[in-house]
Amino acid sequence: MDRRSFLQTTAAAGVGVSLSPFVSVGQTRDASVSIGLIGVGSRGTSHLRGLLQREDVDIPAVCDTKSDNLTRAQDLVQQSGRARPEGYGDGDRAYRDLISRDDIDGVIVATPWLWHVPMAVEAMEEGKFVGLEVPAATTVEGCWELVRTAERTGSHCMFLENVCYRRDVMAVLKMVREGLFGEMIHCRCGYQHSLIPFLFNDNTSFGPGTGSVSSWRTEHYVKRNGDLYPTHGIGPVAHWLDINSGNRFERLTSTATKARGLHDHILEEGSDDHPKADVRFAQGDIVTSTITTANGESIVMTHDTSLPRPYSLGFRAQGTDGLWTVDNQSVHVEGRSPAHQWEDWERYQEEYDAELWTRYESEAEGAGHGGMDYFVRNAFVESIKQGVAPPIDVYDAATWSVLGPLSEQSIDQGGEPVEVPDFTDGRWMTADRSFDPDGAF
Amino acid sequence: MDRRSFLQTTAAAGVGVSLSPFVSVGQTRDASVSIGLIGVGSRGTSHLRGLLQREDVDIPAVCDTKSDNLTRAQDLVQQSGRARPEGYGDGDRAYRDLISRDDIDGVIVATPWLWHVPMAVEAMEEGKFVGLEVPAATTVEGCWELVRTAERTGSHCMFLENVCYRRDVMAVLKMVREGLFGEMIHCRCGYQHSLIPFLFNDNTSFGPGTGSVSSWRTEHYVKRNGDLYPTHGIGPVAHWLDINSGNRFERLTSTATKARGLHDHILEEGSDDHPKADVRFAQGDIVTSTITTANGESIVMTHDTSLPRPYSLGFRAQGTDGLWTVDNQSVHVEGRSPAHQWEDWERYQEEYDAELWTRYESEAEGAGHGGMDYFVRNAFVESIKQGVAPPIDVYDAATWSVLGPLSEQSIDQGGEPVEVPDFTDGRWMTADRSFDPDGAF
């Protein structure tokens, strides 16, 4: 079914017009789902542990090029009472043997960033329902490739952006949709998290063979200068502003500061002749991007990961009738709050708590990242089981992730505005919302 | 003495190289200073009351085109035990009679924005020491005219940016200068203040003859779209980043949201056929500007005045070793704060309190805007008395105020970066700091 005939069919059937051209509502699969994991390092193992808590998930295969990771994953599955899964780890292309298996419905990709696109693309080509870790891609072309592959193959790609399920941002989403803030005007977000403990192994070393994240992620800081990690911040904002369902990002300008944090850290913690003391990091310590939307809002997005600081995603949601800001845990709603004064967030969190959270609170406890991970995995599994498009889809993956490479372009051009591609080919104007805090998953 | 010979003389004399080409160190005047006020509306009257608290200030003349204002000001001076001042109010050019008086040392200009440049320029031409309210100018050319007039005439123009004297931002300045935050990387600031109660008279009307600020300021929201009021935010940031004394603003990009707040307010509060219901406001509700500096820092500046919200100037000062943010009243200093955690600001405020504040705390109490006004007036009066350049000078006035019209340009050009003029003609590289939290004033 091509895109046009799909839209006509669903419209005629009275079904909400999904952005996805290939959703098949009502087509359910077996009660259990079999999932393969590509990448069972820190993040992939966390997903694995979460999946093993469920009775409706089988894990027939796992893949990792590090044998330690692979063995740990196989042991974990076996210890859960399931059959020991097949392990694939013989070289960079071992994942191909996993995705070509007929007994796998879905694949979670939790590998270093540069592998996200080829692995997701090839898995979709094999007909698998992909769960893709963040960011989806690090280039504009990579984003397009994900979208085009999904459209061509009819396979789904759920973007595993867990922060969309954070309890407070979901409550804010309900407030936005119920109109408490009036018409939306402005949002802020960012990834403000000192990653120094992660970007170095043994405190100062990085590069191939130096542990986990330091073996690949730090290299992005050497070669790139932009918002390397936009989606934890922009995902929730995209939901508040109906991006891809009535709205879209139009343009972005980005600015980077000088790069000091990582270099200073090496000099302070290492010896004078430290082998990494001569490395010039391209990545500015703080990258600020301003994004405009078709509906006239603006968004300020921050990347701040190489300086010492407390963690904050820096959220702010503001409309004609009030605003919420995360850093002071406060809200102001015109007509309800005392004039010109903040109210504590707590009462609003209670009143607008997502039904998903009240329903699954006990399951979410201890599931990683404050429970968010439970929900994003649950949505992935349930979408496969119920044969429906995921609530966070390939268009979201592309639209949110592309802000990274676009910020690099803008910085490279001295802050020139850069147009954001429309991955939906115009369907953002009429597509229904797919993400629902009070929905089934 | 021209600029070159001034610089040589002061350098030879071992005197710090001031940015000002015409400072005459050590040339003291009489113990009392006579000051004329142009504009004795709300803001000018506040200055007048403050000046009348001092024994070293005479007020021989006041000027205002509104006779009520004029009479009130004359009464206030007389009630203080001084001679009733001459009042000038006969038409828009009445101020010329005030500034041409020989018995006036200084002039405070606190009039609607469009009058700031002509009044300050003409007062400087009459040899007066000008105290100029914010913003100094609303156009790039106006900023240049102030600087060129000061340089040509040798008259001083102090920019009365009171927030530079706010107790917390001065303590932060001390922390910055003592290196607590390491090398500075990033700052934030803004004017986030719901001005709806001021921009309308009787809740919904504005325009000539409709009261105080609503009679002229609201018109800027009809015709302009940019950061209309940058200096309360950018003044303190400029001090933290040594702007005009070793650093300078290089470039700015600005983004405006749609304009909803003021129009919605008229529709909600007025009748359907309200005479102002058809007014199209050009000013976007939220304007975000990103500024880069010669030393590689970035600044995010916000203008947010037409939506309901609690007041905040949104400050953030961040360096390689930590940061302060005003909205959560918290600070993090690497090596001193617990890793990745905030500390309460209070203890730092005490430890780094400006000597100016500990010295003049009792005088500042009740002086307006939490005491800041006392300090900015004191600096103005003392600079005249001691015959020295003011701590916030005409270059600061121009450099900070020009961000307003430049943001309009950038927005008009779809967010294109705009270069910030160097009003110091290169002397920003070598000029000494003029603002000192522990100084005499």
Image (spheres, coloured by chain):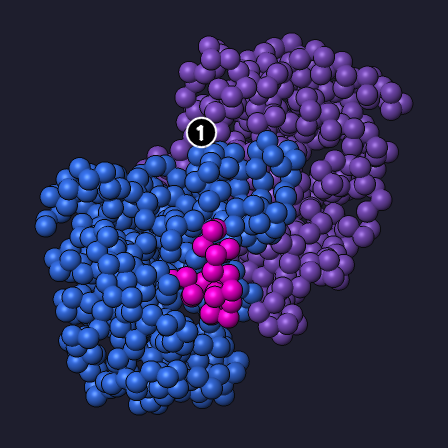
Chain colours: A purple, B blue
A101 up-or-down from B199: above or below:
above
Magenta stretch, residue numbers? B354-376
What residue is drawn where x is 30% and y is 75%?
B58
B66 up-or-down from A208: above or below:
below
Q: Which of A46 and A153 is in front in this view?
A: A46
Image coords of residue B156 (percent x, y): 22, 60
Where disc 1 sits, the SS reads loop
What residue is drawn where x is 36% and y is 80%?
B41
Q: Can residue A213 be seen in this view?
A: yes
What residue is drawn where x is 43% and y is 49%?
B438
Check residue A49 for magenta coloring. Answer: no
Residue A335's quadrant in the figure?
Answer: bottom right
How many numbered badges does the structure rendering display? 1
Q: Which of A118 and A168 is in front in this view?
A: A168
Q: Is residue A171 left or right of residue B136?
A: right
What residue is drawn where x is 78% and y is 36%?
A367
Residue A134's quadrant in the figure?
Answer: top right
Which residue has dot 1 on it? A260
Check residue B372 for magenta coloring. Answer: yes
Image coords of residue B412 (percent x, y): 30, 58
**Amino acid found under the numbered disc labelled 1:** Arg
Q: In this view, does B148 lie to the left or right of A366?
A: left
A368 up-or-down from A16: above or below:
above
Q: Is the magenta stretch mostly helix, strand or loop?
A: helix
Q: Which of B40 and A249 is in front in this view?
A: B40
Q: In this view, does B255 lie to the left or right of A198?
A: left
